[in-house]
Amino acid sequence: MNSPVIRPRRLRATPALRRLASETRLHPADLVLPLFVREGTEHPLPIQSMPGVVQHSLDSARRAVTEAAAAGIGGVMLFGVPSHRDATGTGATDPDGILNVATRALVAEIGDALVVQTDLCLDEFTDHGHCGVLDSHGRVDNDATLVRYREMALAQASAGSALLGLSGMMDGQVAAVRETLDSNGFADTAVLAYSAKYASAFYGPFRDAVESTLDGDRRSYQLDPANRREGVREAQLDIAEGADVVMVKPAGGYLDVLADVAAMSEIPVWAYQVSGEYAMIEAAAAHGWIDRRRAVEESVLSIRRAGADAVLSYWAVELATWLNEKDAR
Ligand code: PBG
């Protein structure tokens, strides 16, 4: 009775056995770094609620993508922080708007060493801070927003973005953008659908990062955190509409949704470890309450284990550097 026949501990006995028995591995190529580029700044500016993350100037963004490529990560996801905002977010479609300018500059800087991707959403560019345009009652107008998303898609594809990250949660956004890209000579520009994007408190620090003006919430378009099946349904719809990649966001609190989507999807499934997930670990580590490196590695590993093929993480480059050190040993 005290001598079990089945002993799972055997494979845990030594580092070499554990390494061989590992079911999930992290690799720099599976990591994507979100980057904020601010209009009209000469120097990078710190983001208070995201220690270690900055709003880049164009120059510092160029250095950051060079460093990211050297670390071997898979790509960057660009967000623009414009200095002017208006009702329809004209800065998003202006070829001289910060996001489009930054895309051209970074694609020119880095070529094909990593994938330059762009956030396709209006919230950084609208004065009311919503992800779409508003109707006469102040509600987000789904179909009028699709028109703006089509225009954004053209601006971003023209600037050289390889993968458009549709994060606005409007119905039909993938089909609309796909149709516009295809009929304008951009059949090779890929679409990453933020399919299961939940109305989450964990986006809090991001709103600092992009200086969000939102007064209210996004619950009329982002998913209810209570809903699991609905996340899968959104991913199914996006796949049917022609998405190339589907995403679940946030990641850490939504591993069940991620596992469900990964089980049914025939296309790559990514997850976004969001600003609040970053800030929590950084804050706990700064207090000495948690081992920072182990917590970062475990948090991203858990997202991979749940089914993400790639992970957007603010730690992407630092984590890649750690992984490269391990490889060198
Ligand atoms: C919308 C967008 C948001 C995030 C990424 N894209 C903000 C939101 O929906 O409120 C959040 C990312 C993060 O918290 O790290 N453009």
Image: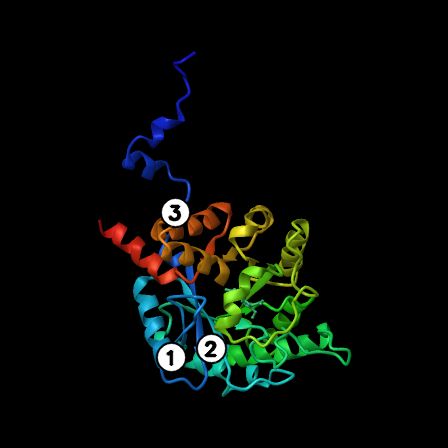
Sooner in the amino-acid sequence: mark 1 or mark 3: 3
Could you say which is closer to the camera, residue 12 or residue 182? 12
Q: Is residue 327 above or below residue 128?
A: above
**Residue at the image position 68 percent from the left and 76 percent from the top:** 145
Residue, disc 3: 25
Residue extending farthest left? 329
Q: Are marks 3 and 2 in contact (CB under 8 Å)?
A: no
Crowd rating for badge 2 (residues with CA inside 10 Å; few <14, some 14–19, many 20+): many
Could you say which is closer to the camera, residue 135 or residue 276? 276
Question: How far is mark 1 from mark 3, CA to CA?
Answer: 32 Å
Q: How many marks?
A: 3
Horizontal side of 80 relative to 325 (left or right) equals right
Residue extending farthest right? 137
Secondary structure of the residue carrying numbered label 2: loop
Amino acid type at image mark 3 = Arg
Question: How far is mark 2 from mark 1, CA to CA?
Answer: 9 Å
Horizontal side of 267 relative to 230 (left or right) equals left
Q: Are marks 2 and 1 in contact (CB under 8 Å)?
A: yes
